[in-house]
Image: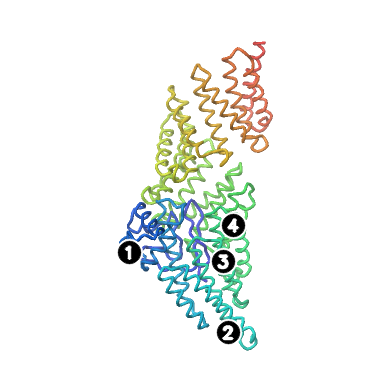
Amino acid sequence: MGLAAALLIVLAARGSAAAEGSSVTATTCAVAAGRDASHNTLTCNFGLTPEQLREVTKAAVEGAGSLLDRVEAISRRLGITSSAAQTLLRIVGEQPDVPDERLAEVLTKVATDYMRLKAQVAGLNPDNPTAKALVASAQAEIEAGHLDRGRELLRQATQAQLAAAEAAEQLRDQAQAAVDAQKLGAARSTAAEGDVAQTERKYLEAAELYGQAASYVPSRHLDEHSALVERQAGALYWQGYERGDNDALRKSADLCRTVLAERPRERVPLEWAGTQNNLGLALQRLGERESGPARLEQAVAAYTAVLEEYTRERVPLAWAMTQNNLGNALKALGERESGPGRLEQAVAAYTAALQERTRERVPLDWAQTQMNLGTALQRLGERESGPGRLEQAVAAFTAALEEYTRERVPLDWAMTQNNLGTALFRLGERESGTGRLEQAVAAYTAALQERTRERVPLDWAQTQMNLGLALAVLGERESGPARLEQAVAAYTAALQERTRERVPLDWAMTQNNLGLVLAVLGERESGPGRLEQAVAAYTAALQERTRERVPLDWAQTQMNLGTALQRLGERESGPGRLEQAVAAFDASLSVIAGVWPPEWVADVRARRAKAQAEIFLRQ
C-alpha cells in the first residue's frame, strides 16, 4: 500500500487530520483524490445555494419527479448517471441532522464514497463465472444508482465464491491456489459491500463487513488482511467521532494495534507510520472525552513515533499534518495541567507544522493550524501576567480569518470569531480602557450570526455566555446599568440550552456568572430584588457545584453567595442574612485556605469578620 492508503481521512475541522485509504480520481466537482470532504475542505457547491440543494434532496427523498434539471446538472458535474445522482441526493436528504449549509459538504463526501465504491467494484475480477456475472450485474446496478440491488448482488457474489471455495477445499492439496483465489474474491466483494455501507454512513455495518472480509483472506495474504482490518478500524473511528461512540473508538484503537503487529516498521515503515497516526487519532478522541490523561499521553507517544518515519524531508505535508495532530494532543494535556510545559510544546508543534502548511500551498489547513496555535497561545496568555501571548493569539486568530471566511466556511469562521473574542476579552480584563472589551463584544456578536440556536445550540449558548462575560466587565466599568442588563440577558439566553439535565456543570457555571452580574446590579440599586435574584442563582449553582465534585468551584460560589447575603444583611435590621453569610464564608474557607493565594484568603476572612462584627452589634 502507498502512503495515502495508510491513513484514514483529513480531519481539518478544529484539529487532527489523516488521509484515507484507496484513492479516488477527482471528478469535475473537484472531489479530492484519496480524501474525505469535511466542512473545512469543501470543494464543491454543485452550482446551487444551500436552499436549492435542500429542495433537490427533499424531492429525491419523496421520489418526486420535479427539479429534474437540477438533478441532471448535479449528475453532469459528478460524471454519474441521473439515477445515481438521485440516489446520492436521497442518502443525503435522509440524514436529519445535516443543516442546510453542510448539505454540499455531505453530498461531496457521499459522492466521493460512491466514486470509491464504483472503483472498487470495477476492480473485482472473480474467477467464479457465476460470481463474475453477479459482480458485473452489481456494477451496472451501482452505476445506475441502485445501491440496495448492487449490494444484494455483491452479497450473492460472496456466497457464490464462498460456495466455490468450500468445494475447492475438498481438493486442498491439488487446488490451494484456487481456494485462495475464491476467498480473496469473497473478501473483496464483501469489502465492496462494506463500501456501500460506508457510503450510506452506516459505519457499524461497514466495520462488520470489513471484518468479515478480513476473515476470508487466506493466511498467506497478510498485507491484504491488514488493509481490510485498517478499513474496519477507519469505519469504527468515524462511528466514534461522528456519533459519540466511545466503545467504537476503543475498538478502532485495538484494531490499529493489530495492524501494527502485522505490518512492522522494519518491513513497511510508511504504512506503519500511517497506522500509528490513526491510532493516535482514536486515542486522542478518547482522551478528550475522559478525565484522566492516560489516553492523551498515549496519543502523544503515537504521534511522536509517526514523526520518526514521516520526516519533513520525505513527506513534508504528512509531517506537518502529524505535527498539527501532536499539537492538539499536547494542548489537551496542557489545558489540564497547571504548568505551561505542554502548552509550550503544543505551540512549538503548531509552529513547525506551519513551515509546510503554508497559506499558498494548503490555505484551509494553514488557517486550521493558525487557529489551533491561537488557542494554545491564549491558554498560555491566561496564565501569564504580561499581554504578549494574548497579543500573539489575537494575531493568529486574525490570520486564520483570512482563509476561514464566512462565505467559505461559515461555522469555522464563527468559531474563530468566538476564539478571537475570548483572547480580546482576556486582554481587555487587564487594561483600564474598554477598547479591547468592545472588540470582544463585536467578535462574539459576529460569531452569533452563524452560531445560531437552531443550527448549533450548545455552541450558540457558549458564545452567549462569553458575550455575557465581556458585557459584565464593561458594565462594571460604566456607571449606567445598560451593559449589565445586556449581560443578564446573554446569560439567561445561554441557560435555555445549557440546561441542568443536559450539561450540569456548564449550567452551574452560567448560574454562578449570572449571580455575579445580578449582585453588581443589586449593589447599585436601593431595593433588595437583584440581590435576592443573585442569591437564588448562586444557590442553584451549588446544586451541581458540590464540594465532592468540584471543590474549588463550590468554594468560589460559596464565597459569592456569602458576599450577596452580606450585602442584603447590611440593608436589613435582623441578623439572619448576616449569619447565613458567615456560614457561606466558613464553607468557602474550609476549602480555599492553603490553596488560594494568601491575599485572596485574607479577603474572604475580612468579609467574614465584618459580617460577624455586624451581627455582634445587632445583638
Q: Position of residue 312 (x, y in %)?
A: 50, 61
Q: Residue 198, relative to residue 448: is it above or below?
A: below
Q: Amino acid at mark 3?
A: Glu
Q: Which residue is mark 1?
A: 72
In contact (CB < 8 Å): disc 4 and disc 3: no
Q: Residue 76's quadrant in the figure? A: bottom left
Characterize the local packing of mark 2: few (<14), some (14-19) or many (20 or more) Cα atoms within 10 angstroms.
some
The residue type indicated by label 2 comes to: Ala
Front-lying residue, 173 or 591:
173
Quick one: label 4 or label 1, which is nearer the N terminus? Answer: 1
**Nearer the camera: disc 2 or disc 3:** 2
Mark 4, residues whose alpha carbon is within 10 Å: few (<14), some, or many (≥20)?
A: many
The kind of residue tagged 4 is: Leu
Label 4 vs label 1: CA separation? 39 Å
The answer, for residue 469, to whether it is visible in the render is no
Rendering quarter of residue 176: bottom right
**Gap in Å between the C-alphas at discs 3 and 1?**
36 Å
Q: Depth-wise, is mark 4 or mark 1 nearer the camera?
A: 1
Element marked by disc 1:
helix
Q: CA distance from mark 2 to mark 1?
A: 45 Å
